[in-house]
Amino acid sequence: MRGQPRGVGSRTTVRGAWLAILLPQLLGAGSESTGAADNGVYLEEVATQAEADEYTVYDLLAPDSASFRISYEVSATTAGAKVFYNPIRSGSVASDESVYDAMSGAALHFDIVPGSEARKDPLMPDAEPQTQYIKVTLARAVPMHGAARLLILKTYRDENSYHRDGEAIVFRRSLGIRRNKVILPGGYEVVGLNVPSQVLSQADGRIAVSFMHAGAGEAGLILRAVKDAQTGAAAAPPAPSTRRSWEAPFAGETEQDRLAERAHEDREIVYFLQPPESHSFILYHDYTETRPGVNGYANVVRAGSVASHPAATVLDTGEELPVREMTGAQLSASKINTGENVPPAAHVVVIPFTAVKNGETLRLRITETYTAAASYRLEGQDLVFDRSLGRPRNAVVLPAGWYCTFSATPATVSQLPDRRIRLDYWDDRPEPVDVLLKARRRVPAQP
């Protein structure tokens, strides 16, 4: 999780530098001369407000109302924080606010405070004095390297963002959140859209657009729609099927997978490459369990890979979870409900936890070391990472002392404070992203 600026007054500052969380128990044999400590898992430690995993739904109300209902999912990530501030955007009139704890589903207390008051909190030194904030009292203090997940609901009236233009309606808004969905009023179809997006149908037939914005800065969305679409029962779409794409040379994803909303997919994975001679990488994989009755997670180890040193944590509470390794047959015989069918001969890493109840969710982090010679290797001078990544949000961190020379798939690039290079691959398509990444060792700095 990385603290990032989100809205007025939510700037993240780092206390000194990033906190390097070395996980020596996760490092397999084979770490070479650069040293295992150079390539550990890095998680950010901040003193001011930071957030992650933001996702917003804009539900457009009747056009003449100039209003839209906002559903905002966000994780507060500043360790020890007991409150969270959400700005009310300048130019918008807010009403009907409510806030819920995503883990328990319980309503949370909040107050509307001016920026001048928010600035008194060490979490918000840069709060804008003229901005109003929703100050939320969290259900529990944010655990170290964990998260307090929130659902914030509010209605905005903003004629500049949402208005009529002749026969059309227009939703024009700069969106700083990187994952968004906009739902049109019933009976409207999309006739203009400037940000590449999925077009989806809601269960009631209303049309929605959804997108992931991987780049820096805001997405300047302009959405136009006209009222000539079906309404009522006739507009409701059939359930997506399990048919697969017919395209050669192989059967593709199912219709169900292809039509699922990518922006709201909650899985994120980060690979920390160890020296290439080891063929190993540490990864952590975050996901949210929402299915009532499920009381375990099963990670089926990919063919050609060897997993070792698994660990798991509930990000909501900081609780460390037990980890078991078994076959698919042993999993079937156990009382652990992972919500999926696993082949009997498969090697599975299983994390049991307390069964999820109706209205509750859990955010989990699973950490492992993988060794995969076919995916990660040294060829002459070149480090080669060649792997198909199936999550919408993927990141790869190069080992210390290496620089990127090729990335076949477009990525955004950043540098960690220890000078390691991180490449983020946000995949807004239903098929996996095939990453072919090469790197070389840096030359020593000149005196």
Image (spheres, rainbow, N blue to C red):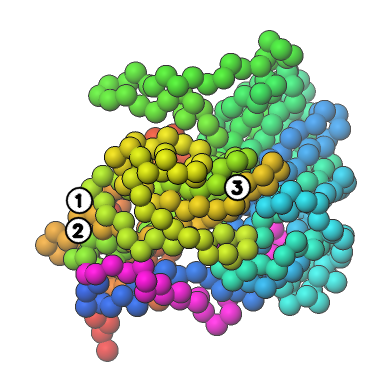
* Residue at image location 81% in from the left, 51% down from the top: 107
- Whether residue 305 is visible here, answered yes or no, is yes
* Residue at image location 28% in from the left, 25% down from the top: 250
Horizontal relation, residue 436 to residue 69: left or right: left
* Residue at image location 46% in from the left, 29% down from the top: 258
Task: Indicate which disc, 2 or 3, sits on the residue closer to the N terminus.
Answer: 3
In terms of image quadrants, where is residue 69? top right
Looking at the rendered structure, the kind of residue marked 2 is: Arg
**Residue assigned mark 2:** 377
Task: Check residue 331 for magenta coloring.
Answer: no
Looking at the rendered structure, the kind of residue marked 3 is: Ala
**Residue assigned mark 1:** 374
* Extent of the magenta region: 1-30
**Residue assigned mark 3:** 355
Q: How many angstroms separate mark 3 from mark 1 (CA)?
A: 37 Å
Horizontal relation, residue 121 to residue 352: left or right: right
Task: Indicate which disc, 3 or 1, sits on the residue closer to the N terminus.
Answer: 3
In terms of image quadrants, where is residue 277? bottom left
Q: Position of residue 321 (x, y in %)?
A: 51, 61
Q: How many angstroms separate mark 2 from mark 3 (CA)?
A: 40 Å
